[in-house]
Amino acid sequence: MATPDAQHRAGEPISEAEAIERLRQTADPSQQYYGAWWLGRMRSNHPEAVPLLRIALRERKPRDPGAGVEENAVARNAARALGKLAPAAAAAIPDLLETLDDSDHGLREAAARALGELRAEAAVPALCRRLASGPGVAGALEPGSPRLAEPCEALLEALGEIGVASGEVVAVVEPFVEHERPLIRSAAARSLLQLSGEPRWGALLLELLEHPQLQVRRAALMDLGAAGWRPALEPIRRTLAENSLKLIALRGLVERGSGEPGEAALLACMDELL
Amino acid sequence: MEMAPDALLACIAAVQEATSSEALVLATRQLAAAGHPEAAPVLVEVLGFNNPGAAVAAVDGLIALGARAVEALLQLDPQNYGARAWAVRALAGIGDVRGLELLVDALGSDVAASVRRAAARGLGSLQLEQLPAAERSAIAERCLAALEAATSDGEWVVRYAVAVGLEGLAPHLEPSSSRWQRAEASLAQLSETLAGNPEVVRLRANLALIRLRQP
């Protein structure tokens, strides 16, 4: 379906053919950036979308700063778009796997998220490898930056989305529920809840849903929705956060969850939040 | 129980003179709790202060005032975009037919999905029961046309709200009239399995259809 909103926000509305052409040309990276975003946002199924996004992803290099698009921005948007084009973008899994080892932190993050969205089981060993050193190394603060050594949140969430619940995966993820950052604890709990379905991980997310920082409550909302954990209905209704985010979380409970509370109760709560 | 005039004036002054975000939220809550119609213009003013906590309290207070808050809400400067979004939510919650134009306009053209969502819900919950039949029919037609047009909104949450709005509007449409059939057709469209139409929207539209078809 068309989304007039998104088009207006980004400038003038364009057609799918125009988005393809913008991504194909290489003279103006800012046009490529927009073309890649458009194809992902509109869930394009144009036959050239995935091949062109793969090419854009492979062109990872510093770009002309004068062009108004920072280094690797096109490649990052290409990775994000590929994640949204599942299952057609399965052909890009090898490219994304390679990108997972790029030196650009932001690019690794985008690749991890895309691999999660593509449910790429082939990516599990590589995702585990980047996290295996644990919260103290992979999860350590990068000197001189607010970032961690690895994009832990994205890596943890990807493992949960892919859903290979082996002992090895759980052993890699579990130490991160002790990470000093609540957002990382939330991502780890979400992942473990998806992998094991054990209520203790849901309970940990409910604790985070009462965190004094809004940013943490927002993350816990999204994580409960992603895991579809229906016992969270009442706590979601009560927490202090925007109704827009509560609605997204409840959609997750409806579509991804099962059991009690049932659909009728979930939909009634959504109606109240509109 | 209404507040003494002095106490009301003190509440209004506290809102207008608040020097911090927290103080504004607290003062707005107190003014909203006063439940006094003279608080309405001040609560509407708060909607434009770019303070979400205070705006939520003001919207709650305006909805509690109901019909007595509508004039103040309609006098809002249409250029004040942030305030308008909150006003749509308040009018949707109040359900007074004087809010019709603003709700129709918001559903059709607001850039924020959260505002279109509130407007769609509001168009299904206007209080039409007490109106003369001709007026009731004309307003129901406006609501129906606006909701029909929004069944192709790009945001799932707006389409979800359209399903809720159509269900709320249905009792005001003559059963098996052409309007009733249009509402039913829009819900049927929202219940279809199409790329980009998530399961939650389909479920909600189906629920509305089942409720509509119950004798």
Image (cartoon, coloured by chain):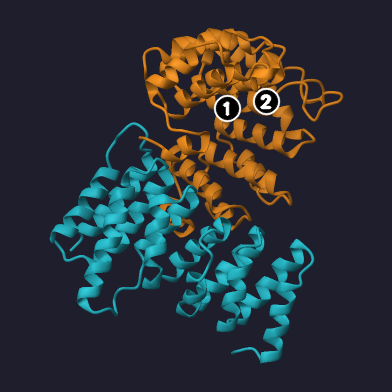
Chain colours: A orange, B cyan
Position of residue B88 in the picture relative to residue B48 (left or right): left
Q: Quadrant of residue A160?
A: top right
Chain name for mark 2: A
Quadrant position of the N terminus of chain A in the picture: top left
Which residue ends up furthest to the bottom in the rendered image?
B4
- A120, above or below B23, in the image: above
Quote the CA–CA distance across marks 1 and 2.
9 Å
**Residue sitting at x 61%, y 30%:** A191
SS state under label 2: helix
Q: Which residue is mark 1?
A: A160
Residue contact at pointers 1 and 2, CB within 8 angstroms: yes
Q: Which amino acid, by three-letter code, is at mark 2?
A: Val
Q: Which amino acid, by three-letter code, is at mark 1?
A: Gly
Chain name for mark 1: A
**Residue sitting at x 56%, y 15%:** A28
- B118, above or below B158, in the image: below
Instruction: Tell me, yes or no, if residue B128 can be seen here.
Output: yes
Position of residue A45 in the picture relative to residue B179 (left or right): right
Q: Are marks 1 and 2 on the same chain?
A: yes
**Residue sitting at x 59%, y 58%:** A238
Position of residue A214 in the picture relative to residue A21 (left or right): right
- A147, above or below A59, in the image: below
Where residue B76 sits in the image (x, y, percent)? 53, 67
Q: Quadrant of residue A166?
A: top right
Q: Residues within 10 Å of mark 1 (few under 14, many from 20)?
A: many
Of residues B80 and B35, the one drawn nearer to the viewer in this rendering: B80
Q: Residues within 10 Å of mark 2 (few under 14, many from 20)?
A: many
Where residue B153 sits in the image (x, y, percent)? 37, 44
Q: Which mark is residue A173?
A: 2
Earlier along the polypeptide chain: callout 1 or callout 2? 1
**Residue sitting at x 53%, y 20%:** A31
